[in-house]
């Protein structure tokens, strides 16, 4: 059985985390620092070539030109010291000095590099406010790279700069409209989350498409997600799979993971479990925790790969050890049942606890069971009910059913039938058979609410249809006292409830 997993939360943290932003900016700015163009001027270009060939006289002439205020020579010297050559030692402090001289003369690319130097301490002391000043100078002159850098700076904040999401969105938009791909991706994310701009899924999809069409793999994955879930575009699993493949073919682990899920479910592509396992393996090898867990379940269940419980545990462990709560639950279950590892209830509980404190409802539920049964921990009904409550409040239907049962029996909480009915109803509404059966029993016996044979039969009927044996028995008992009209009404209510759950969301 495939587990619940919140791949969205994992992806979001990865996509918009500061490390990702820094990586993008550094890659682009390093490329800028290596930039060589004819705008240095012919004489400067000639001198650069001679310097790289080791001509000391050319080196001296270039220095003299820089000291005399020649901005092109200053830019060239900044680039030489930044990157180093066979004859020039790399020296970021000298690089920053020369770029700063050129920046003060209005050289846009030098201004961007100086902003970067202050932002990351490349040859100067870190100073985000000074970085913002130099980025602003270049941005005001239309540099989309500087506009993107300002957007990143105001989005993340820190180092003396107060986060300002509307201002970040402004700078991203200016750069995005000029075709700057990272800004297009970032602006899309802000529209998706409503950060600094009103949430707008259509505009999010619009900007994801702009970046995706430029070949940005992260944007291709996000556009695939938009088509997968119908966010800002008409739902289309075929187009979703096509965009996931574009990203996957570039080695993007999120695209690979989503493509694998499409092959597993047959959503937009023909179902192919070996192909699903292949793509999950590629994503998992890059550290994608969602794919590590799902590849683990593929081995656990023998889906697309030979069944191998030990191999499953290896992948669960990889995800668990990088803090992914669903991997921690999966590893905890392996220890609980001895699947691929020696059975170890204490180790099982340790992993459940790691997941539970991250607010993973499956970890909370499993920890509740451990305390209820004394499995790996001393039996403690109060702690069991406490963990059931946390799972229940996070929306887990099974946790709601078990919390309701705790109130029904007075185990770990005061006995309270009305409170038990409240939680049984929440679980039943999600289709949980235990909750439906318990709610049916409450109606049947008048425990926490008035007796109602029709509603009792309805909920028992729904639970029995899921194989809940006690409800099948209760239903039979009810039939002995109910009239045919009442039974027909209860069956109609059951059908209507099922139909309401199957209706497409509006």
Image (cartoon, grey):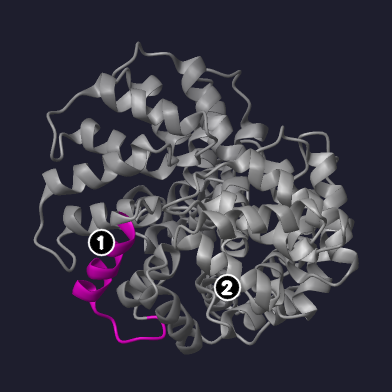
For residue 480, side relative to residue 140 (left or right)? left
- Label 2 belongs to which residue? 219
The magenta span reads 267-284
Q: Helix or strand or loop: what does disc 1 sit on?
A: helix
Image position of 229 with respect to 19: above or below: below
The local secondary structure at tag 2 comes to: helix
Q: Quadrant of residue 277?
A: bottom left
User: How far, Cα to Cα, is label 2 from label 1?
Assistant: 22 Å
Q: Nearer the viewer, residue 422 or 206?
A: 206
**Residue situated furthest top in the rendering:** 378
| Depicted 43 relative to depicted 113: above or below | below
Report x, y in % for residue 232.
Answer: 70, 79
Q: Report whether 341 appears left or right of 111.
A: left
From this view, report whether residue 38 is shown above or below residue 469: below
Horizontal arrangement in the rendering, residue 396 relative to residue 68 (left or right): left
Q: Left or right: where does residue 382 sit relative to residue 314?
A: right
Quadrant of image for the N terminus: bottom left
> Residue 473 or 81: which is nearer the viewer?
81
Per the picture, the main secondary structure of the magenta-coloured stretch is helix
Q: Is residue 143 visible?
A: yes
């Amino acid at each position: 059985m495939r587990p619940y997993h919140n791949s969205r939360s994992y992806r979001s943290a990865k996509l918009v985390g500061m490390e990702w932003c820094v990586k993008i900016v550094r890659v682009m700015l390093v490329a800028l620092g290596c930039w060589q163009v004819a705008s240095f001027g012919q004489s400067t270009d000639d001198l650069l070539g001679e310097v790289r060939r080791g001509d000391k006289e050319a080196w001296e002439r270039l220095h003299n030109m820089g000291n005399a205020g020649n901005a092109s020579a200053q830019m060239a010297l900044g680039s030489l010291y930044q990157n180093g050559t066979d004859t020039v030692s790399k020296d970021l402090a000298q690089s920053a000095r020369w770029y700063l001289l050129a920046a003060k003369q209005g050289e846009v690319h030098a201004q961007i590099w100086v902003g970067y130097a202050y932002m990351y301490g490349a040859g100067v002391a870190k100073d985000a406010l000074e970085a913002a000043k130099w980025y602003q100078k270049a941005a005001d002159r239309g540099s989309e790279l500087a506009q993107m850098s300002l957007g990143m700076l105001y989005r993340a904040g820190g180092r003396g700069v107060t986060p300002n999401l509307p201002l970040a969105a402004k700078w991203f938009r200016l750069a995005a409209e000029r075709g700057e791909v990272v800004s297009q991706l970032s602006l899309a994310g802000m529209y998706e989350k409503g950060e600094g701009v009103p949430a707008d899924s259509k505009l999010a999809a619009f900007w994801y498409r702009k970046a995706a069409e430029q070949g940005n793999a992260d944007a291709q994955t996000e556009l695939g997600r938009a088509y997968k879930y119908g966010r800002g575009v008409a739902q289309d699993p075929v187009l979703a799979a096509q965009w996931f493949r574009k990203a996957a073919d570039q080695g993007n682990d999120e695209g690979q993971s989503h493509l694998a899920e499409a092959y597993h479910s047959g959503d937009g592509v023909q179902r192919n479990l070996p192909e699903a396992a292949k793509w999950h393996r590629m994503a998992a090898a890059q550290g994608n925790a969602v794919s590590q867990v799902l590849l683990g379940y593929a081995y656990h269940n023998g889906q697309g790969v030979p069944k191998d419980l030990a191999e499953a545990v290896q992948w669960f462990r990889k995800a668990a050890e990088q803090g992914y709560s669903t991997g921690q639950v999966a590893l905890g279950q392996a220890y609980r049942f001895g699947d691929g590892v020696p059975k170890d209830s204490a180790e099982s509980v340790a992993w459940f606890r790691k997941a539970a404190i991250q607010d993973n409802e499956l970890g909370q539920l499993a920890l509740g069971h451990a305390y209820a049964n004394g499995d790996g921990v001393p039996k403690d009904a109060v702690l069991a009910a406490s963990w059931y409550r946390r799972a229940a409040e996070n929306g887990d239907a099974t946790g709601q059913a078990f919390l309701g049962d705790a109130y029904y029996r007075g185990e770990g909480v005061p006995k309270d039938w009305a409170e038990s009915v409240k939680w049984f109803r929440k679980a039943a509404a999600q289709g949980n058979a235990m909750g439906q059966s318990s709610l049916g029993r409450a109606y049947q016996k008048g425990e926490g609410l008035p007796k109602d044979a029709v509603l009792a039969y309805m909920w028992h009927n729904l639970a029995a249809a899921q194989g809940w044996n006690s409800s099948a028995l209760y239903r039979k008992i009810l039939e002995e006292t109910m009239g045919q009209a009442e039974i027909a009404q209860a069956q109609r209510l059951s059908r209507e409830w099922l139909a309401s759950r199957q209706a497409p969301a509006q």
